[in-house]
Image: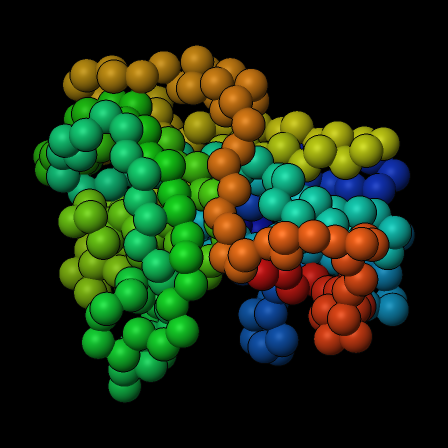
Amino acid sequence: MEPASLENLCVLYHSANYIVVNKHWDIRIDSKMWYEKQTVQSQLKHRFPELADPDTYYGFRFCHQLDFSTSGALCVALNKAAAGHAYRCFKDRLVTKAYLALVRGVVAEEKMTLDFAIGKNITEGKTHMMCTEGAEGCENPKPCQTELTVLEYGEYDGDPVTKVLLQPLTGRTHQLRVHCSAIGHPIVGDYTYSLRTDNAPYRMMLHAYFLHIPLENEPIHVIAPDPFIPSLDLKWAPQRCVNILEDLLKNILTEPQAEIQEEPEPVCRKSSPVESEEQQAQCQQWLCEWNVD
């Protein structure tokens, strides 16, 4: 992949309401730091200056987040109404996402459900990290699940690795990275969750491959091309195929996504639920900027 630059912005989908870009692995979504000139925000302003909204802090409303080192599909709303519609889909967990990753070692089980609860790590020196329930310093862990399916076995730069498809059923910070690390197969190049040991690869091998937002008037269905192929990275040498990516994607689209119930539902409701003032305030904040859990 070409180095990140203001001009190097790959657009996967563009309408009057949304843009979906293929985020570069070496660029932040946005930044308040004056010295960080290259962000997805600045790329969008450079390519589409007429679409920037002066009423928002960043100029664009990002519908969700990707970590700095994660590449792939990233959706941007171009107006407040579009942001609101996308927000509802994310809030109601109607969005389907699937990621590709290379993980260290040989994953023995072809298909796994990872259901470690994840919380904030408050241990000194690790406050930038998340951790699984029961770990020292784990604060306020919340339920989360990830479906893992093996695609290929092979080697990366001579070391055994497994190419996997990851489908998050919840959206916790660093969820996929923490879950892979928790089963003893950290993502290749994940310096943070390999305890600062995996620093040889040029990037973290995590890519947002598929994004489906079932908007009523404009359903978004986008694939960001697979970057983990030998023609793009000679250090990746696949040796045995277990599942075909295209077939798995068809199954994801046809099978209903499981839901994680965090709070018991009331037995009886006489009227439709009404959002609290706090929930409405959170929604308004998200519309004005971009943050969504």
As displayed, is residue 194 above or below residue 105? below
Whether residue 38 appears in this view of the structure is no
The picture places residue 243, in percent across and down from the top left corner, at 31, 17
The picture places residue 221, in percent across and down from the top left corner, at 66, 28
Q: How many marks?
A: 0
Residue 163 in the figure: left or right of residue 47? left
Residue 56 in the figure: left or right of residue 221? right
130 and 223: which one is in front?
130
Q: Residue at x 53, y 33 (%)?
A: 257
269 and 37: which one is in front?
269
Q: Tell me, what colour scheme is on the image?
A: rainbow
Q: Which quarter of the rendering shows the N terminus?
A: top left
The picture places residue 86, in percent across and down from the top left corner, at 74, 47
Quarter of image, res 9: top right
As displayed, is residue 265 above or below residue 126? above
Q: Residue at x 31, y 74 (%)?
A: 138
Quarter of image, res 130: bottom left
Residue 47 in the figure: left or right of residue 174? right
Q: Residue at x 21, y 76 (%)?
A: 136
Whether residue 31 appears in this view of the structure is yes
The picture places residue 132, in percent across and down from the top left corner, at 29, 63
Q: Which quarter of the rendering shows the C terminus?
A: bottom right
User: Which residue is farthest bottom?
Assistant: 124
As displayed, is residue 95 above or below residue 170? above
Q: Residue at x 61, y 45 (%)?
A: 93
